[in-house]
Amino acid sequence: MTQRAIDAFQATTALACFLHIPELAARLSKEDRGGNWQLPENPAQTGAACTTISAFRR
C-alpha cells in the first residue's frame, strides 16, 4: 500500500467515527450482535501483563 492509500483510509475512518456511523449502523441493525458478555470474576494473569503488574506492586 502507498502512504496516500493509508492516509485516505485513516481520513475515511476518522470521518465515519466523527459522524457516528458505527453507532447508526448498530442502531439500524436488525440483528443484535451481543455485548452482554459474561466475564470471569478474576481472570487469570498470564504473560508479560502479569510481569508488568507485579512490577507496579513492588
Image: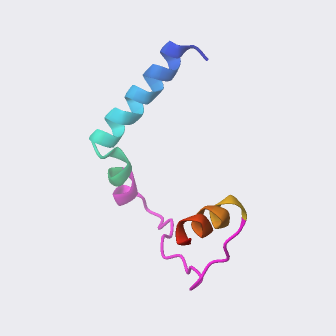
Q: Position of residue 44 (x, y in %)?
A: 67, 77
Residue drawn where x is 51% and y is 18% of the image: 5
Residue drawn where x is 47% and y is 67% of the image: 32
What colour scheme governs how the chains and residues are painted in the rendered image of this protein? rainbow
Left or right: 37 with respect to 47?
left
As drawn, the residue found furthest toward the front would be 58
Q: Position of residue 3 (x, y in %)?
A: 52, 15
Q: Position of residue 43 (x, y in %)?
A: 62, 78
Q: Is residue 9 highlighted in magenta?
A: no
As drawn, the residue found furthest toward the bottom would be 41
Q: Is residue 14 above or below residue 7?
A: below
Q: Is residue 35 highlighted in magenta?
A: yes
The quarter of the picture where residue 30 lies is: bottom left
Q: Is residue 3 above or below residue 30?
A: above
Q: Is residue 20 above or below residue 46?
A: above
Left or right: 25 with respect to 56?
left
Residue drawn where x is 71% and y is 68% of the image: 46
As drawn, the residue found furthest toward the right would be 47
Which of the two residues, 56 or 20, is positioned nearer the viewer here?
A: 56
Left or right: 17 with respect to 38?
left
Q: Is residue 14 above or below residue 33?
A: above
Tell me the chief SS of the magenta region: loop
Left or right: 10 with respect to 44?
left
Q: Position of residue 20 (x, y in %)?
A: 30, 46
Q: Which residues are magenta?
A: 25-46
The quarter of the picture where residue 49 lies is: bottom right
